[in-house]
Image: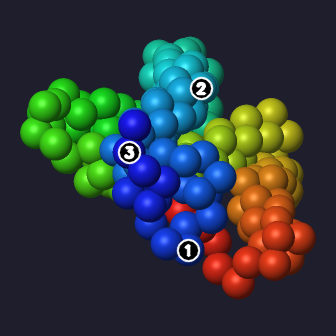
Amino acid sequence: MAAPEQRREAGDVAEAERDETPTERFDRNWSELLQELRVAQTGIQILSGFLLTLPFQARFKDLAPVLVVVFLAAAVLATLSTALVVAPVTAHRILFRRHAKGLLVDVGDAMAKIGLNCLALTVVLVVVLVFGFVVDVTAGLVAGAICLLVFAVLWLALPMALTARGRTASGESAPTRG
């Protein structure tokens, strides 16, 4: 086993607490990312499947023109979400055994974040579509705005607040990686 000085970089609290090498950290980060992508992928597949069936329903022709645009935007975003959430796995297959795990983790992290944002927007548009069709377009826009606010609070504001709270509690001035 490598000496602690060799195993961690100076000042990296997360690595010091875990006593892991950069390679071990990348392996752990990759494994965690894959678990997160598995959860998201299931939801994206269900949502995409729902969207793909809509044009084949008899009442689809009754959609207001603005809701047809909302549907098409939701379909595009669902497709983009799928591509972004699956892309890290494809990249892993291409980069397998090329000693690029760090790059893979960084790129996979970015793709997952963008894919999850696309997923949130897809859900918002589906809410607009459903409420717009069942009630009216105004109700759809209001429901969509509320849904967008919920995602902004739960997926953005809350994690940022928890990060800031964790830094304050530990006395850190900047977030650690890992």
- Give the crowd class for mark 1: few <14, some 14-19, many >=20 residues within 10 Å: few
Q: Secondary structure at mark 1?
A: loop
> Which of the two residues, 85 or 143, is positioned nearer the viewer here?
85
> Which of the two residues, 43 or 136, is positioned nearer the viewer here?
43
Q: Secondary structure at mark 3?
A: loop
User: Please, what is the three-letter code of the amino acid marked with disc 1?
Assistant: Gly
Residue indicated by mark 2: 39
Residue 4 visible in image: yes
Of the image marks 3 and 1, the number of the one nearer the N terminus: 3
Residue drawn at point x = 76 percent, y = 66 percent: 163
Is 105 located above or below residue 87 in the figure?
A: below
Residue indicated by mark 3: 2
> Which of the two residues, 9 or 178, is positioned nearer the viewer here?
9
Where is residue 12 drawn, in percent x and y?
55, 67
- Give the crowd class for mark 2: few <14, some 14-19, many >=20 residues within 10 Å: few
Is 152 located above or below residue 147 in the figure?
A: below
User: Please, what is the three-letter code of the amino acid marked with disc 3?
Assistant: Ala
